[in-house]
Amino acid sequence: MTEKKSEREFIPLNIAVLTISDSRTEETDKSGKKLVALLEEAGHKVYEKKIVPDDKYAIRAEVSQWIANEDVQVVLTTGGTGVTGRDGTPEAVNVLFDKTIDGFGETFRAISFQQIKTSTIQSRAIAGVANGTYIFCMPGSPGACKTAWEELIQHQLDYRSRPCNLVELMPRLREV
């Protein structure tokens, strides 16, 4: 179901994309490329795209730089949200949150259940806000990124979405 759009003007956001993987390169990063294509298709701007290894300190360092940068309104991460090996994105990012957006992970898993059934319990997708920057951490598969963007994130990052959206709450955009 598509959310209603009001008569408001679209506000393009600066979005940073972080792929978390020990094995992906720019050439093989399908999920990061998918997120870039989806956010650009929606009218947003890619502020920066990077790849870091599955290391909680490397993840935290990159996300910390972006949340300290007033030009970045949103950070999207892909990878490291599973339960195996070095998956540590939630542990890296959770400590940065001023507030957790519990509904993102809960709703993402509910939607994913329709597609991948009980395998969705392995997802530790999370979201929150840190220093006025919204952060969404998604699994590493292109399908999961597509689902998270199309079903949840794109609507909340569209100022025209009603009854409410995250853009109207962004302190960094209040001057706009």
Image (cartoon, grey):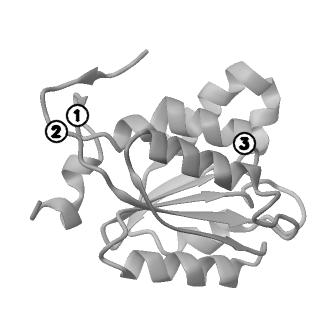
- Judge the density around disc 1: few (<14), some (14-19), many (≥20) Cα neighbours within 10 Å: many
Can you say which quadrant of the picture contains the C terminus? bottom left
Label 1 vs label 2, nearer the camera:
2
| Residue found 24% across the figure and 58% down from its top | 170
- In which quadrant of the rendered view does residue 142 lie? top right
Relative to the observer, which residue lies in front, 152 or 103?
Answer: 152
- Judge the density around disc 3: few (<14), some (14-19), many (≥20) Cα neighbours within 10 Å: some
Vertical side of 16 occupied by 67: above or below: below
The residue that disc 1 covers is 160
The residue that disc 3 covers is 142
Point out residue 90 in the picture as x, y percentages from the top left corner: 64, 63
Tag 2's secondary structure?
Answer: loop
Tag 1's secondary structure?
Answer: loop
Tag 2 near tag 3, CB within 8 Å: no
User: Callout 3, which amino acid?
Assistant: Pro
Relative to the observer, which residue lies in front, 49 or 175?
Answer: 49
Residue 99 appears in the rendering:
no
Instruction: Specify which label sits upstream in the sequence, 1 or 2.
Output: 2
| Residue found 69% across the figure and 39% down from its top | 144
Label 2 vs label 3, nearer the camera:
2
The residue that disc 2 covers is 9
Marks 2 and 3 sit apart, C-alpha to C-alpha, by 30 Å
Tag 3 near tag 1, CB within 8 Å: no
User: Callout 2, which amino acid?
Assistant: Glu
Relative to the observer, which residue lies in front, 10 or 110?
Answer: 10
Instruction: Specify which label sits upstream in the sequence, 3 or 1.
Output: 3
Tag 3's secondary structure?
Answer: helix
Point out residue 41 in the picture as x, y percentages from the top left corner: 47, 39
Residue 38 appears in the rendering:
yes
| Residue found 31% across the figure and 40% down from its top | 158
Tag 1 near tag 2, CB within 8 Å: yes
- In which quadrant of the rendered view does residue 67 lie? bottom left
